[in-house]
Image (spheres, rainbow, N blue to C red):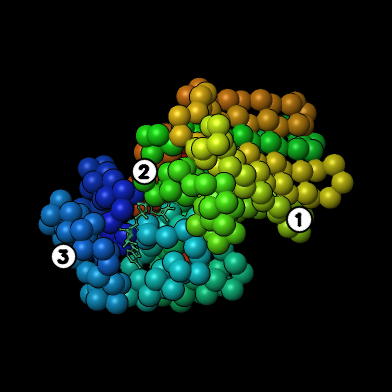
Amino acid sequence: MAGLVIVGAGPIGTMAAEAAVDDGAVDQIVGVVDPDPRARRELVAATGAPGYTSTVELPPATPGDAALVAFASAAEKVAPEVIRLVSAGYDVVTTCEGLAWAPRHLWDAMHTSARSDGRTIIVTGTNPGFVMDRLPLLVAGASRKITRIHVERHQDTSDRRPSLVAKSGRGLSQTEFAEGVRSGRVGAKGLDSSARLIARGLEWPFNDVFVTIEPVLDGDAVIGAAHHARLSAGPGREIVLDLVMAWGIEPTFERITIDGIPPIRMETIGGLPGDEATVAHVVGALRRLGTLAPGFYRPTDIPIRYGVS
Ligand SMILES: NC(=O)c1ccc[n+]([C@@H]2O[C@H](COP(=O)([O-])OP(=O)(O)OC[C@H]3O[C@@H](n4cnc5c(N)ncnc54)[C@H](OP(=O)(O)O)[C@@H]3O)[C@@H](O)[C@H]2O)c1
């Protein structure tokens, strides 16, 4: 019996719990961890699993158990929880944006802990995790002598989860928006991770990634955020990522432009529904857990499987 513990009973944890059982990736939900009593209660009621306020209270895993960690974007916050779960015997899938390209010391700590406990940790998601890194890298395989990769994503936040709308800065004054960006409360996380994942996939050496976040305005009102990331990999080689997340914008799309031989330009029509796609990636990652050697896997470390992931 493969059981799944949900750590973070927000929209992603909740949707993934249902999808993982529905798709047969796990047999049942065996625990719900969330300090928020309302969120915890709702998922406990929906799954029949016991609820916990912290991972400290969880019983050790039984063979085959995994945990989905979906509660925060910051690597420093999530990595200690992942290590605790691994020590308790759980394989881990996480949607934590900051772990898509974990700081070296955290990567070392998680990889070492996974290897010594014989467990697997997979970081997955849509952005980062797919649309601005894995997908462009796959497309780049059809081109050579690449000098530039540019990925653009325009998302309408009006049908997205509340935490994403809050991160986009909608409803803030321009001063509050600037303060939010400085404190890290405003702005999507993980654009720098995506740029680094692409550079690593292309085997391009690089130093740093420069990210700017500006408000998207409708008159004087802030309706979202425009993120721009640029990674330079020496003369004539760069990766540029532009992510706009704003309320009610049209059109919505993802566009990949590759300068190489041949040049490639690809665009999704209507854009990828991010939350549903993230849930699909989580279910796919749960299925892959038993097939990979113990260790820590960034989104682009997972070998590609064609068809069902
Ligand atoms: N890579 C991707 O493409 C991708 C896509 C979607 C989501 N994500 C990330 O996945 C995570 C989940 O998304 P979401 O929208 O469901 O988040 P959310 O709405 O913020 O919900 C997270 C839940 O986790 C709870 N929580 C806080 N600290 C916790 C802890 N230490 N242990 C267990 N639960 C805790 C929160 O409680 P409180 O409300 O009391 O804090 C909240 O109920 C977020 O970090 C999000 O950014 C990534």
Marked residue nearer the N-terminal end (2 or 1): 2
266 displayed left or right of 30 = right
Ligand 1 rendered quadrant: bottom left
At label 1, which amino acid type do we have?
Answer: Phe
Quadrant of image for the C terminus: top left
Q: Measuring 37% from the left and 59% from the top, which residue is drawn there? A: 71
With respect to residue 303, does 261 lie above or below? above
The disc at residue 206 is 1
* Residue 305: image location, x then y, percent: 47, 41
Which is closer to the viewer, label 2 or label 1?
2
Q: In this rendering, is residue 243 above or below 28? A: above
Mark 3 or 2: in front is 2
Residue at 36%, 43% in the rendered image: 161
Q: Residue 262 got which mark?
A: none
Is the shortest distance between ligand 1 and the CB of mark 2 under 8 Å?
yes
Location of residue 56 in the rendering, given as x and y in whole percent from the top left corner: 29, 77
Which residue is tagged 3?
50
Q: Earlier in the sequence, mark 3 or mark 1?
A: 3
Q: Which residue is mark 2?
A: 161
Q: CA distance from mark 2 to mark 1?
A: 34 Å
Q: Amino acid at mark 3?
A: Pro
- Corner quadrant of residue 92: bottom left
Element under disc 1: loop
* Residue at horizontal 52 percent and vertical 75 percent from the top: 109
Question: Is 45 situated left or right of 100 in this image?
Answer: left
Residue 61 at least partly seen: no
- Left or right, 116 with respect to 265, comes to left
